[in-house]
Image (cartoon, rainbow, N blue to C red):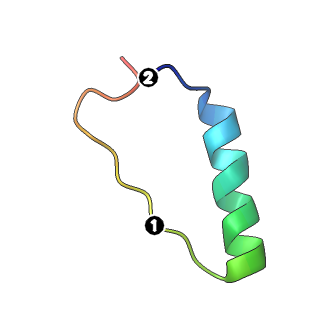
């Protein structure tokens, strides 16, 4: 599944700011 890293990071920041935490799981080779 293609994704934009800056979009993912922006969403993570939003979660941390609104909920106080976030969990991110990344598989080996993600983004290649």
Q: Which residue is drawn at the image coordinates 62% and 42% (left, top)?
A: 8
Quarter assignment of residue 14: bottom right
- The answer for how far apart the CA atoms under marks 1 and 2 are is 19 Å
Q: Quadrant of the N terminus?
A: top left
Task: Classify 11 as above or below 30.
Answer: below
Q: Quadrant of the C terminus?
A: top left
On the image, numbered disc 2 is attached to which residue? Answer: 1
Task: Classify 3 as above or below 26.
Answer: above
Secondary element at tag 2 = loop
Task: Classify 26 as above or below 22.
Answer: above
Quarter assignment of residue 16: bottom right
Report the residue that reaches farthest toward the left: 28
Q: Which mark is on residue 3?
A: none
Say whether marks 1 and 2 touch (CB < 8 Å): no
Secondary element at tag 1 = loop
Left or right, 5 with respect to 19, comes to: left
Q: Dot 1, crowdedness within 10 Å: few (<14), some or many (≥20)?
A: few
Q: Dot 2, crowdedness within 10 Å: few (<14), some or many (≥20)?
A: few
Q: Position of residue 27 (x, y in %)?
A: 26, 40
On the image, numbered disc 1 is attached to which residue? Answer: 23
Q: Number of callouts in the render?
A: 2
Query: Mark 1 or mark 2: which comes first in sequence?
Result: 2
Q: Which residue is drawn at the image coordinates 66% and 83% (left, top)?
A: 20
Left or right, 3 with respect to 30, comes to: right
Q: Which residue is drawn at the image coordinates 59% and 32% (left, top)?
A: 5
Report the residue that reaches farthest toward the bottom: 20
Quarter assignment of residue 12: bottom right
Task: Classify 12 as above or below 17.
Answer: above
Q: Position of residue 7 (x, y in %)?
A: 69, 37
In this rendering, the label closer to the viewer, 1 or 2: 2
């Amino acid at each position: 599944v293609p994704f934009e890293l800056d979009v993912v990071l922006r969403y993570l920041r939003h979660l941390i700011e609104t909920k106080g935490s976030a969990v991110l799981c990344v598989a080996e080779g993600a983004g290649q």
